[in-house]
Image (spheres, rainbow, N blue to C red):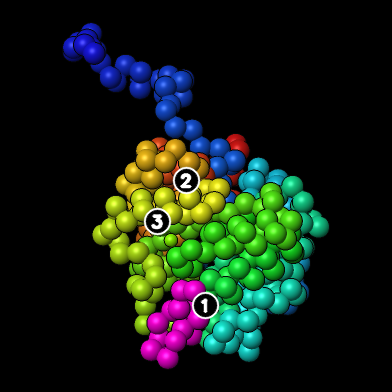
Amino acid sequence: MSQAAFPALRLRRTRAAAWSRRLHAETVVTPADLIWPLFIVEGTGVEEPIATMPGVSRWSVDLIAKRALEARALGIPAIALFPNTPAGLRTEDGREALNPDNLMCRAIRAIKDAAPEIGVLTDVALDPYTAHGHDGLVDAAGYVLNDATKAVLVDQALNQARAGADIIAPSDMMDGRVTAIRAALEADGHVNVQIMAYAAKYASAFYGPFRDAVGSRGRLSGDKKSYQMDPGNGDEALREVALDLAEGADSVMVKPGLAYLDIIWRVKQAFQVPVFAYQVSGEYAMIEAAVAAGAGDRDALVLETMTAFKRAGCAGVLSYHAPHAARLLGR
Ligand SMILES: NCC(=O)CCC(=O)O
Ligand SMILES: [Mg+2]
């Protein structure tokens, strides 16, 4: 294709006026692109601020229902739930994950009562329930067992679906769990419950504040490198995504977000499926730290990062800044 040369071609011409910039925008973010992750804690009327995530709190079940109403008012289609399980209920086998009256299930029911039109995404992994802070069952040497964990995750997913979850999101990185969860959901009648697989989840340093939020930081022995991915690996991410899609995932996630835009792009180009990014706790904290230091403007940083995720190919973004972004976008 031949194109004009300067001065016939001036790329600044279409940037000169605001109306024209809007007209030529290639990427548009709306509140419908957002999923809002929320932390749940026991009690009534409880809001517990999370020190490493200024502006983010844990909420008791009654107040979580209010957040769902807030999401609805802001045009946010879905929320994601993460429980801070009381210390006394954390065990080696994480069995509280299977309790039909656990914090997660009570929160799902409260949200479905208050705002049934809001999608509820639930995390499948054992880390908020285990005494050792790992996502699965560990053997005597501290290795996270794949197949034994997978069996528990299936029961955890069913427990969530029976409470009313709309999207089951396995974040554990065990091999083969999507097949097993899909089969169990079908057999139990949950044919329209979706699976969003955390397909390419990296062993990242950006999860620190999240571990504070769910209370697993001090517990974690060792690291998660035997199940989460090496940050240097890109081809392997495509294999992870291919496997989860073949197993029946409806959508896939790349996590963390901003440092992995190339992975999002490669996944979208290779598979043309719905890809979601998780802008994780450490990314949230970085933006807030920049704002607190006077080094950046929150509104601009939030909107620019959201736009970057969409440009890279995302169908949507899980972000702790979701309500803030929705407020900005709804103006
Ligand atoms: N399974 C969910 C997460 O691990 C979230 C991590 C974060 O926000 O840092
Ligand atoms: Mg996998």
Label 3 beta carbon less than 8 Å to ligand 2: yes
Tell me if 164 is positioned left or right of 253 in this view.
right
Give the Cα separation between the discs numbered 2 and 3: 13 Å
Q: Is residue 200 left or right of residue 46?
A: left
Q: Quadrant of ligand 2?
A: bottom left
Farthest right residue in view: 113
Regarding residue 274, the answer to whether it shows in the image is: yes
Q: Which mark is nearer the camera, 1 or 3?
A: 1
Circle 1: element type:
helix
Tell me the tag on residue 240.
Answer: 3
Q: Is residue 131 magenta?
A: no
Q: Is residue 139 magenta?
A: yes
- Label 2 and label 1: CA atoms lie apart by 28 Å
Q: Amino acid at mark 1?
A: Ala
**Label of residue 275 in the image:** 2
**Start and end of the magenta stretch?**
132-147
Mark 3 residue type = Glu
